[in-house]
Image: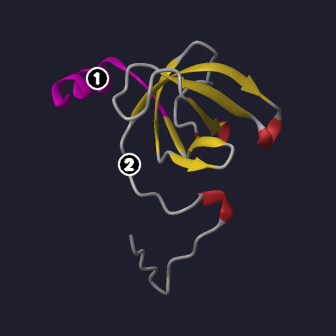
Amino acid sequence: MLFVIEEDEVLSRKEGPLLESDTAIEVSVGELVGTGDGRYAVTYTTNDRSLPVGTVITCSVKYWRGMGGLEKGQVISVKGVVKYVKGWRAFEAHPITPETSNEREERG
């Protein structure tokens, strides 16, 4: 796959690598690790078709887009998932609400 970067586009490490897919994956939060800017969530896939159930995906808490804080046991949706040597990493995380849950059911 070839990516073309326009002159006015700037990529920073904070934004993560170029992502090939914005497919949402449903995961459950197993634990929150670290403190401050280094805090991240360790999540596990639930019944998504993209990856086997129980696959670990980590996500920095700074990518959380929910109104409240991220909590252990919460079922959330992650996007921008990329494979690294140490495992899968997500660059976007959202809460699953009744509205988003219904949208997923209608599509799938």
The three-letter amino acid code for the residue at tag 1 is Glu
Helix, strand or loop at label 2? It is loop
Looking at the image, tell me whether mark 1 or mark 2 is earlier in sequence order.
Answer: 2
Quadrant assignment for the N terminus: bottom left
Q: Residue at x 50, y 63 (%)?
A: 18
Q: Is residue 94 rendered to the left or right of residue 84?
A: left
State how far apart marks 1 and 2 are (Cα). 19 Å
Determine whether 29 is above or below 107 in the image.
above
Quadrant assignment for the C terminus: top left
Q: Residues within 10 Å of mark 2 (few under 14, many from 20)?
A: few
**Label 1: which residue?**
99
Q: Is-magenta flag for residue 97? A: yes
Determine whether 36 is above or below 12 in the image.
above
**Label 2: which residue?**
22
Colour scheme employed for the rendering of this structure: secondary structure
Residue projecting furthest to the right? 35
Stretch in magenta:
94-108
Q: Picture coordinates of residue 80 (x, y %)?
A: 47, 48
Nearer to me, 95 or 44 = 44
Determine whether 8 is above or below 52 in the image.
below
Q: Residue at x 66, y 30 (%)?
A: 41
Q: Picture coordinates of residue 103 (x, y %)?
A: 23, 28
